[in-house]
Amino acid sequence: MNRTTASSRFAPRSLGLSLAAAACLAAFGGSALAQEKVLRIAMTAADIPRTLGQPDQGFEGNRFTGIPMYDALTHWDLSKADAPSVLVPGLATSWKVDDKDKTKWVFKLRPGVKFHDGSDLTADAIVWNVQKVLDKDAVHFDASQVGVTASRMPTLRSARKIDNLTVELTTSEPDAFLPLNLTNLFIASPAHWQKKFDAAPGATPADKAKAAWTAFAADASGSGPFKMARFVPRERLEVVANKAYWDPKRTPKVDRVVMLPMPEANARTAALLSGQVDWIEAPAPDAMPQIRQRGFKIESNAQPHVWPWQLSFAEGSPWLDKRVRHAANLCVDREGLKTLLGGMMAVPKGTVPPGHPWWGNPKFDIKYDVKAAQALMTQAGFSAAKPVKVKVQISASGSGQMQPLPMNEFVQQSLKQCYFDVEFDVIEWNTLFTNWRKGAKDPSANGAHATNVSYAAMDPFFAMVRFTSTKTFPPVSNNWGYFGNDEFDKLIADARTTFDDKKRDEALAKLHARIVEEAPFVWIAHDVGPRAMSTKIKGFVQPRSWFVDLAPVSMD
């Protein structure tokens, strides 16, 4: 396998930092934290996701620095293991699109909510948080938060206060997906930021604002069930219970949560087995029998989370030939990969499974059929003596990436029998995630013909629209490969402008069927979110979601 020099340097440095963090935790946990109920978690991220309100590090950021410390207007229900997560009220108690103008939505806010600094949540705070990522003229506008926010809600344009507890949001076009997208807009305290701004150094307002956001990130204030207590970049984040949280069902059961970045699966596993942490994300597959034998439990559940290769449709890409795309989808031994992962994956038939309301019965059947794949490759002009050369940009770890190195190496060998010569460009996870918005034509792609970024498929925009619309070409959103045409734009518009749930599902089913048939991805695996934890942990729910809720978790 080929790797870049930069990525080779990255791996040992991350492991060293992770082990240092674990050693620090062990020492610290034995003294100052001994009297508290403390939950210690090892993440797959190489750094602490950003804490200032809009996390990075993919959706691991939302999971560990977004949802615990902040609220959004709308939330995902993460309380059930036996049903899909659905949208529920968050800071908004209700919302409605305008009957006459479908670009306008009115959100009624929850009364009595306070930020961690004691200030009140009002419509002004919602307007301020929309401005922080959309209004370049606002003094608190922060370009560093735009990418991970605007790309997830590209139609949102502005916010207007109607009264203290009512706000109007405006979109660029009718968009029935907006309430789902708003789960990603975490609401930070304007009053707390203003104090940081007033105290910040700087010759200009822009300089002061940048310094204020840096100070805010180190001393954050949201309205979530946990409050920031200690933050050491690249080493640890500690949050403590917000006992005054507005939802009694989500008042935390533990006193403190300590989160550590540990990008290497074996390091995470060692930290769990040695008692340095209580919970690890994505344990090493070959260590799962030992983890169970040592008395730990492994949680997993089917979830809407896709592990693919997203393909380039830029000029010169080998994937422009649909026969090659279909051949790759027919040549991956997914059952063998599942065995490699200790059973911790689901075999995909598309972005959503058969039986899902968006399934749509595509005419192309994703399965393991080497002879059919070889026949397609022969038609396309390739053979064992003349393989197609494919370069894929991947990471060595990261949020939702499962076990990216062994998985990609397995796929590399699987595709070899169908005349694919696969080369990897291995880079750091957060860089790969950032490159995802820059696109296949950007120099950051380093000539790659595909990118391996896993994605959540909870809602229509995240699952399908951002990858197939010509309006989501880079840098707007995540259509890295520049896939799309008039047909797909029409299918998307039909779904996006349908506000009746059943009819919208029917439109989305048509869209999904065509996506599978055209195959802008190689669908490789669906994640089941394995995490290993101590039996001391009680009350944990593994939902059918990429996210989890730390609030109900208790420790014996």
Image (spheres, rainbow, N blue to C red):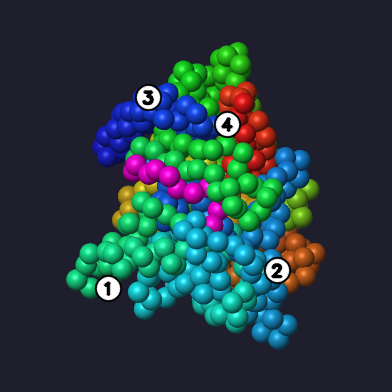
Q: Is residue 224 magenta?
A: yes
- Between discs 1 and 2, the one toward the N terminus: 2
In this picture, which residue range is highlighted in magenta?
223-233
Res 376 quadrant in image: top right
Q: CA distance from mark 2 to mark 3?
A: 47 Å
Residue 539 falls left or right of residue 137? right
Q: Secondary structure at mark 3?
A: helix
- Quadrant (top left, top right, bottom left, bottom right) of the N terminus: top left
Q: Residues within 10 Å of mark 2 (few under 14, many from 20)?
A: some
Disc marking residue 367? none
Residue 460 falls left or right of residue 429? right
Q: Nearer the viewer, mark 3 or mark 4?
A: 3
Q: Nearer the viewer, mark 2 or mark 4?
A: 2
**Is residue 163 in view from this perspective?**
yes
Disc marking residue 27? 3
On the image, the x and y values in percent for residue 495 come to: 69, 68
- Judging depth in this view, the residue of 227 and 88 nearest the camera is 227
Q: Secondary structure at mark 4?
A: strand
On the image, the x and y values in percent for residue 517 come to: 65, 54
| Amino acid type at image mark 2 | Ser
| Amino acid type at image mark 4 | Arg
- Residue drawn 73% across the image and 72% down it: 499
- Between discs 2 and 3, the one toward the N terminus: 3
| Amino acid type at image mark 1 | Pro
Disc marking residue 94? 2
Q: CA distance from mark 1 to mark 2?
A: 36 Å
Check the image and name the residue furthest to the left: 203
- Between discs 1 and 3, the one toward the N terminus: 3
Circle 4 is placed at which residue position?
Answer: 531
